[in-house]
């Protein structure tokens, strides 16, 4: 055995090892902003927050109150693609059936988190 030369075994790395060593690049965050108008009821906002964002009734009421008093409210902070989806879902939610002067959906925008 002493006559045989020593050979180092190569280290074999799998793709999963390489992926776990790489750090994920953090994506920029965006706020989904709901804007106030005088054509939608609190019940509409609460039901929309529950349907689109799965917020509990209490959180939906807080958002409805904030949008009413401040003129705007942050519904969600997420990635740009997800924020765009949620903004579009707000625009497509439809009119408030409880309000006689309502003609369509509420307005929403997205903006980068500062």
Image (cartoon, rainbow, N blue to C red):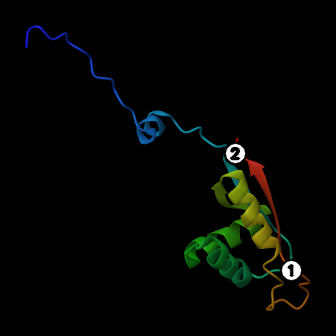
Q: Note whether 40 is above or below 18 in the view shown.
A: below
Q: Note whether 29 is above or below 4 in the view shown.
A: below
In the image, what residue occupies the spot 19% across and 9% down? 5
Rounded to the nearest angstrom, the CA distance separating label 1 from label 2 is 28 Å
In the picture, the quarter occupied by the N terminus is: top left
Q: Quadrant of residue 107?
A: bottom right
Residue that badge 1 annotates: 39
Q: Quadrant of residue 64?
A: bottom right
Left or right, 3 with respect to 103, comes to: left
Q: Position of residue 15 (x, y in %)?
A: 46, 39
In the image, what residue occupies the spot 72% across and 66% down? 86
Q: Quadrant of residue 50?
A: bottom right
Q: Position of residue 93 (x, y in %)?
A: 78, 79
Q: Position of residue 88 (x, y in %)?
A: 79, 68
Q: Position of residue 42 (x, y in %)?
A: 72, 80
Residue that badge 2 annotates: 113
Label 1 element class: loop
Left or right, 77 with respect to 19, comes to: right
């Amino acid at each position: 055995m002493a006559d045989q030369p020593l050979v180092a075994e190569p280290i074999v790395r799998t793709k999963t090892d390489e992926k776990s060593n790489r750090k994920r690049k953090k994506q920029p965050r965006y706020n989904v902003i709901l804007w106030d108008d005088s054509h939608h009821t609190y019940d509409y906002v609460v039901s929309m927050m529950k349907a689109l964002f799965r917020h509990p009734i209490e959180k939906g009421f807080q958002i409805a109150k904030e949008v009413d008093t401040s003129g705007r409210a942050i519904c969600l902070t997420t990635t740009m693609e997800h924020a765009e989806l949620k903004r579009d879902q707000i625009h497509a939610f439809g009119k408030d059936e409880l309000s006689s002067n309502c003609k369509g959906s509420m307005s929403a925008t997205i903006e980068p988190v500062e």
